[in-house]
Image (cartoon, grey):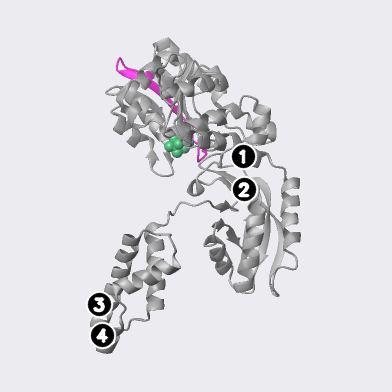
């Protein structure tokens, strides 16, 4: 042990060695600190009579990997080959070209975030989005905040604090990541008044629950589940009528922020924001990064007098958006000015609308480029799969898709792990001992990334 202790390199020596390898990558004080940690750890092991590598080269490698762990950003680009379009763990919606450019533009330097260039006066960051929000939804007014959970919390806080909000028992939803309606309601200071039953709620149930203290009728879209069988819910028309007769606003949390009619592409019905506004809802809330296909955001559109109160509530400041996301959301809304073109320019819509034939063709192209590149014992084929919308939207939509299916002589887990730990990480799924790379969720260039990764992995696995 004593001999090993005396062979331990000095911190200074180890730092120098590391610096030579990592040329200019890390500041010197950080290298020295990490070198000290590694030397201390090795010395402690030796003093406990445990074995420790004392070769300077080996220790320098430990220092380099410690530096990497301490400083690397763990947020990196990833390839989504899962077939789940709005994959919440992979960041939901990929942005359109226009939205990416707008975020970049806002990031480049200063921006007209809260100033009006013409008059040189102070402006509001909310002004950038309101004209576009009203244009694409048909509402009188609108505001966007950090996400839809914040939008609902803000609207309830501004309009119903200390007052009653009537909701159907069939709509007390939980959305992944701990958005639970009763808890959001409690947080806002509004009093939840549940009406109806889990499966059946009528407009008269809401009407009976109205008191002088009722501030809001709230309808919530059951985004991520369906109830089927002996069911009834009050229609939007009935609730609009009820609200008008009693002078109580109706708010509809539609969740996914769909601005187009999905049925035109053979997809299931999903309540669209313009439709809810046309039907007479006073307020509609939705996410920016679900079916809208934009950045993380929560939008509230509706009548000007309610938006006025929402905008001036103190929480509006706490949940405001930053300039990059405002730029990206504005650009995404611009994509929708021509809804037919949005099916081409907004990646989420394009993935939703992709035809099985084009998907089969692109999976087939990948299989052909792979031919001859896989070692003996590996097999690749194109197989039919079912893709999903994800993100807690359209739980019943099963989208016919195709995948490049890879079978290896060893377990599929090893290939799946190798893909996941590749740079950039590639997320696939395993079914029946086969690794499936679904092409519906691939973005331009992802196919080349996958082929290159598979070539490298196959030669090592
Ligand atoms: C997704 C969803 C939310 C939460 O939206 P985030 O943007 O994820 O905060 C709230 N309500 C409904 C109905 C939803 O579908």
Q: CA distance from mark 4 to mark 3?
A: 9 Å
Disc nearest the viewer among 2 and 3: 3
Is residue 271 visible in the rendered image? The answer is no
**Residue 372's x, y, as percent?**
75, 68
Q: Is residue 407 above or below residue 293?
A: below
Bin the neighbour count of mark 1 within 10 Å (Cα to Cα): few under 14, some 14-19, many 20 and up.
Answer: many
Q: Nearer the viewer, residue 251 or 150?
A: 150
Q: Quadrant location of ligand 1?
A: top left
Q: Which residue is mark 4?
A: 49
**Residue 74 falls in which quadrant of the image?**
bottom left
Q: Relative to 229, does residue 63 appear above or below in the rendering?
A: below
Quarter location, residue 340:
top right
* Quadrant in which the N terminus is drawn: bottom left
Please determine whether, in this image, residue 14 is positioned above or below residue 320.
below
Q: Is residue 72 left or right of residue 401?
A: left
Q: Earlier in the sequence, mark 1 or mark 2?
A: 1
CB of mark 4 within 8 Å of CB of mark 1? no
């Amino acid at each position: 042990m004593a001999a090993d202790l005396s062979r331990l390199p000095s911190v200074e020596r180890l730092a120098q060695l590391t610096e030579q390898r990592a040329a200019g990558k890390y500041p010197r004080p950080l290298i020295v600190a990490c070198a000290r940690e590694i030397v201390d750890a090795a010395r402690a092991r030796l003093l406990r009579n445990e074995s420790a590598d004392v070769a300077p080269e080996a220790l320098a490698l430990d220092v380099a990997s410690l530096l990497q762990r301490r400083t690397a950003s763990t947020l990196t680009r990833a390839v989504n080959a899962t077939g789940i379009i709005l994959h919440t763990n992979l960041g939901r919606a990929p942005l359109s070209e226009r939205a990416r450019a707008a975020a970049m533009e806002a990031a480049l330097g200063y921006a007209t975030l809260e100033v009006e260039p013409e008059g040189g006066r102070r402006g509001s960051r909310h002004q950038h989005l309101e004209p576009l929000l009203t244009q694409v939804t048909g509402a009188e007014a609108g505001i966007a905040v950090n996400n839809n959970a914040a939008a609902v919390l803000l609207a309830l806080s501004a309009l119903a604090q200390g007052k009653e909000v009537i909701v159907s028992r069939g709509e007390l939803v939980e959305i992944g990541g701990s958005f639970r309606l009763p808890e959001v309601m409690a947080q806002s200071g509004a009093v939840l008044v549940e009406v109806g039953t889990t499966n059946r709620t009528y407009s008269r149930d809401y009407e009976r629950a109205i008191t002088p203290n009722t501030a809001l009728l709230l309808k919530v879209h059951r985004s991520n589940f369906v109830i089927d069988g002996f069911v009834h819910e009050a229609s939007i028309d009935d609730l609009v009528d009820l609200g008008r007769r009693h002078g109580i606003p109706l708010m509809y949390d539609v969740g996914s922020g769909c601005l187009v009619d999905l049925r035109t592409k053979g997809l299931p019905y999903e309540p669209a924001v313009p439709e809810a506004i046309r039907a007479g809802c006073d307020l509609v809330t939705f996410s920016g990064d679900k079916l809208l296909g934009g950045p993380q955001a929560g939008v509230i559109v509706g009548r000007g007098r309610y938006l006025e109160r929402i905008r001036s509530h103190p929480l509006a400041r706490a949940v405001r958006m930053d300039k990059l996301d405002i730029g990206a959301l504005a650009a995404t809304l611009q994509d929708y000015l021509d809804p037919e073109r949005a099916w081409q320019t907004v990646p989420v819509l394009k993935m939703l609308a992709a035809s099985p034939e084009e998907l089969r063709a692109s999976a087939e192209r990948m299989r052909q480029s792979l031919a001859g590149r896989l070692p003996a014992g590996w097999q690749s084929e194109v197989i039919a799969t079912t893709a999903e919308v994800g993100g807690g939207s359209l739980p019943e939509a099963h989208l016919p898709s195709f995948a490049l299916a890879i079978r290896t002589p060893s377990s599929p887990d090893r290939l799946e792990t190798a893909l996941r730990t590749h740079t950039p990480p590639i997320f696939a799924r395993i079914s029946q001992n086969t690794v499936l790379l679904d092409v519906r969720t691939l973005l331009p260039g992802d196919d080349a990334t996958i082929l290159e990764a598979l070539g490298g992995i196959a030669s090592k696995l």
